[in-house]
C-alpha cells in the first residue's frame, strides 16, 4: 500500500485498554505524519516503528491527545540528530493552550538551560499547511469551545475529525473527494462528542458509509456500533488509503 492509516489508539479518555485516539498516515510503510500524541498512543507508535514520530499534527490540547509530548521532548532533546527537527504542526489558536498545558513548566530539565520548544520545530498553522510537498487542510470542529479543536484533511485520501460533535457543514466542504472519514463516535453522544444517533441524524447515508468510527468507550460499545452496520476502528489496525489528490508543491 502506497498510502495507509495506522491506528495507534482508538478509545476515549477513559478507555485505556484501547489506547488514546492517535494515528499515523503512512507512505510506503513508513510514518509520514502522525495525528496527536497521547501517552498510550505514543507507546504503540514506538512499538510499531521502533522510534519516535518525526512530524505530528495536534488536533487539540486535551491530555489524552498530548500527554505523550513530554516523553517526545525527552527523546528528541537527547538525540542530536533529531533535536530541533521534529515538526509540530499546531493550529494557531491552540498554541497558547499547548504552551500552558505542556510548555510552561519552570524547568523542563532539572539542570535548566532548556526550553520545551527547543526540541521541536513548532509550525503554527491556519487553514492549510505543507508537509513533504503536499498541502493539508485544517478546519475547526465542535469540541468544548470554539477555536480549541481542529480536524485534518489530506484531500482525496483521509479526513480526521478529531474530537467533535457532528460537523455536517465542515464535511460537506472538506470530505467531498471520496476520502476515508475517521470520525469521533461513541455509542451515546454527549455535549463534547458524537453519538450514534447524532451520526445518523446529521449525516447522509453515503457519507456514513465512508466513515471509520473511533473514540468509543470500550469493546462492548465497539461491538454494539458494529452490530448497527458501522465500520469501527481497532487499535493497531492498518487501513489502505487512496492516493492523495492534494495540491503538490512544484518541483
Image (cartoon, rainbow, N blue to C red):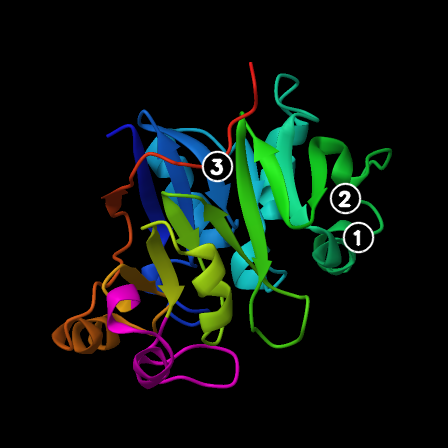
User: For mark 3, what is the residue?
Assistant: 33
Kindly state the secondary structure of the residue where label 1 is placed: loop
Q: Are circles 1 and 3 on residues that touch, CB within 8 Å?
A: no
Q: Is residue 92 left or right of residue 13?
A: right
Mark 1, other Cα within 10 Å: few <14 / some 14–19 / many ≥20: few
Q: Are circles 1 and 2 on residues that touch, CB within 8 Å?
A: yes
Residue 47 location in percent, x, y? 35, 37
Quarter of the image that includes the C terminus: top right
**Image point (53%, 41%), residue name:** 136
Q: CA distance from mark 2 to mark 3?
A: 26 Å
Can you tell which mark lies on residue 185?
none
The magenta stretch is 185-207
Would residue 109 be seen by someone viewing this image from the given angle? no
Residue 187 location in percent, x, y? 30, 80
Q: Is residue 98 left or right of residue 171?
A: right
User: For mark 1, what is the residue?
Assistant: 105
Mark 1 and mark 3 lie on one chain; the one further toward the N terminus is 3
Give the quadrant of residue 81.
top right
User: For mark 2, what is the residue?
Assistant: 108
**Image point (48%, 59%), residue name:** 173
Q: CA distance from mark 1 to mark 3?
A: 27 Å
Q: CA distance from mark 1 to mark 2?
A: 6 Å
Amino acid at each position: 500500500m502506497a498510502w495507509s492509516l495506522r491506528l495507534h489508539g482508538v478509545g476515549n479518555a477513559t478507555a485505556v485498554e484501547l489506547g488514546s485516539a492517535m494515528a499515523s498516515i503512512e507512505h510506503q510503510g513508513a510514518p509520514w505524519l502522525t495525528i496527536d500524541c497521547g501517552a498510550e498512543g505514543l507507546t504503540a507508535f514506538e512499538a510499531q516503528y521502533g522510534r519516535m514520530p518525526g512530524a505530528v499534527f495536534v488536533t487539540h490540547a486535551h491530555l489524552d491527545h498530548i500527554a505523550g509530548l513530554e516523553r517526545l521532548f525527552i527523546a528528541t532533546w537527547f538525540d542530536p540528530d533529531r533535536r530541533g527537527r521534529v515538526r509540530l504542526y499546531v493550529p494557531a489558536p491552540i498554541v497558547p493552550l499547548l504552551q500552558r498545558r505542556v510548555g510552561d513548566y519552570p524547568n523542563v530539565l532539572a539542570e535548566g538551560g532548556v526550553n520545551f520548544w527547543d526540541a521541536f520545530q513548532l509550525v503554527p498553522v491556519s487553514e492549510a499547511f505543507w508537509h513533504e510537498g503536499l498541502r493539508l487542510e485544517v478546519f475547526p470542529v465542535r469540541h468544548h469551545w470554539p477555536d480549541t479543536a481542529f480536524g485534518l484533511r489530506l484531500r482525496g485520501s483521509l479526513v480526521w475529525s478529531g474530537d467533535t460533535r457532528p460537523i455536517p457543514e465542515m464535511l460537506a466542504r472538506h470530505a467531498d473527494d471520496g476520502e476515508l472519514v475517521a470520525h469521533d463516535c461513541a455509542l451515546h453522544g454527549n455535549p463534547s462528542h458524537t453519538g450514534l444517533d447524532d451520526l445518523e441524524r446529521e449525516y447522509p447515508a453515503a457519507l456514513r458509509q465512508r466513515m471509520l468510527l473511533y473514540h468509543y468507550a470500550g469493546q462492548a460499545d465497539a461491538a454494539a456500533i458494529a452490530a448497527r452496520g458501522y465500520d469501527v476502528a481497532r487499535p493497531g489496525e492498518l487501513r489502505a488509503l487512496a492516493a492523495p489528490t492534494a495540491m503538490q508543491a512544484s518541483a
